Amino acid sequence: MKKQVLLLISFSILTIITCNEVGTTYDQLIAIKTVSQRVSDLKKTKIEIKNSEDPIALVREEHQFLEYEYPVRKDESYVIFYRFDDTGCFEIKLDTYLNNQIDAQKVINLIIKDLEVNTTFGLPKKSSNFYRWENLNSEILIELDVQNIKRGHISLNIFSTIFNNLKI
């Protein structure tokens, strides 16, 4: 009996540990789509975006706006916002809310790596708290704001610079 109780306790502890830490923060962030895949969501319709996201994560929907929130770990999440006009999605914003700077820095490094290997964007222009990528014809702009990294907050914005066929 004592052996069975010890085995049950060991199994319970193992289950708790494995369920709380499923993959890295970045693995969870890209479980639905990578950053490069999110770039391809530009110009998609609201219905196409809704069909590609987890419906359970939808927290707000308006005529030209969708907001999704995905949990990462206890007290951590990332939020994705989509904005639409008559031509489709023109802005995607991904905000992370992590508990520490170390995980946030790992996510930043992997986002940069993802975009650097994407031949559409290559190397970013960098300032102290900001990374910026443009595609070759300047129709897509990506900005990674890391000024609040110490609080675990990262903000990634993906824009189509063409609205209703007028370049801005």
Image (cartoon, rainbow, N blue to C red):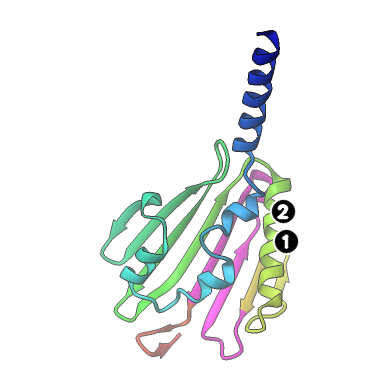
Q: Quadrant of the N terminus?
A: top right
Residue type, numbered disc 2: Gln
Residue 109: image tag: 1
Q: Residue furthest left?
A: 63
With respect to residue 146, does 12 lie above or below? above
Q: Which residue is mark 2?
A: 105
Secondary structure under the numbered disc 1 in the rendered image: helix
Residue at the spot 30% in from the left edge and 67% down from the top edge:
64
Whether residue 76 is visible here, answered yes or no, is: yes
Residue 42 percent location from the top left of the image: 45, 76
| Residue 135 image-quadrant placement | bottom right
Would you say 55 lies left or right of 118 here?
left
Task: Give the mark count.
Answer: 2
Q: Residue furthest front?
A: 1
Image marks 1 and 2: residues in contact by CB distance under 8 Å: yes
State the extent of the magenta-drawn residues as a range.
134-159
